Amino acid sequence: MFKKLIAALAPIAMGAALNAAEAPPATAECVRQAGSTGCSIRWDFLQQPRAYFQVEYLDDAAMQWRAYGQAYDSVRTSSEPVPAGRLYRVRGCDDATVRRNCLTSTVQWAIARPAPDEIPDYLVDGNGVEMQIVKNAPESVQIAQYNVYRLIQLLDRIPDLSRMPPMTKPGTGSLAVSGPSEDQQILAGIYENYTERRSLAVSARKAGDGRGNR
């Protein structure tokens, strides 16, 4: 449907603000609401239960995780759709201030759905390469390309992608039974690019750690 893009990996720098467990024991997904183009964040902390939950988004200016909306207890889905075109995760903790004994979930991308005439001809990645959007393609293809390229722009700016959480795999959780097939295709491209880029960063970090221990 669209070409997979894996840009060259930039030198890895430490980014404490993005530090996360290698394999979070919790998941988050962005579930599309009936009759809406937006999605709400749903989470699963059943493996290691927590009492309070805070939806967080990656601030692409400061490269830090920030709280979005209120903290929740005893629910598993945010009460309203989240802004599109961002990476989200959920922090689960044992206290209402969401600071004590916390775990973070996998990340999920909220699909942006601009009108075709609002989608540009191309986006530019972190290396100055133009990522072309096929403007005579169906709307679904343009939206898919636009979201993958927006993600790549973000990944190119993250100081240390190896310390980001894994991404929720498409076709798991509630999306496996309720997600529109078009959304699944878009998320598949996003997941593939994110996971491959992150895997390269993890391998590079481990190689660097190995050389440092010699």
Image (cartoon, grey):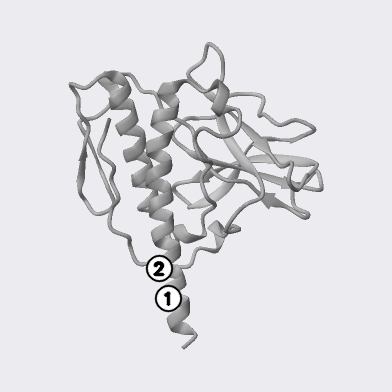
Q: Which is more toward the observer, 70 or 179?
A: 179
Q: Residue at x 59, y 57 (%)?
A: 20
The quadrant of the rendering that contains the N terminus is top left
Q: Residues within 10 Å of mark 1 (few under 14, many from 20)?
A: few
Quarter of the image holding residue 144?
Answer: top left
Outermost residue on the bottom side: it is 214
Q: CA distance from mark 2 to mark 1?
A: 6 Å
Amino acid type at circle 2 is Ala
Task: Check whether the beta carbons of the residues at disc 2 and disc 1 lie within 8 A of each other.
Answer: yes
Q: Inspect this view and state whether residue 37 appears.
A: yes
Where does residue 136 sit, x and y in percent of width and height? 18, 21
**Under tag 2, what secondary structure?**
helix
Q: Residue at x 30, y 33 (%)?
A: 145
Instruction: Judge whether 110 appears above or below 138 on screen.
Output: below
Where does residue 138 sit, x and y in percent of width and height? 26, 19
Q: Label 1, on which residue?
A: 208
Q: Which is more toward the observer, 163 or 125?
A: 163
Q: Which is more toward the observer, 69 or 75?
A: 75
Q: Residue at x 80, y 32 (%)?
A: 74
Where does residue 98 sit, x and y in percent of width and height? 74, 47
Numbered mark located on residue 40 in the image: none
Q: Residues within 10 Å of mark 2 (few under 14, many from 20)?
A: some
Q: Label 2, on which residue?
A: 204
Total count of labels: 2
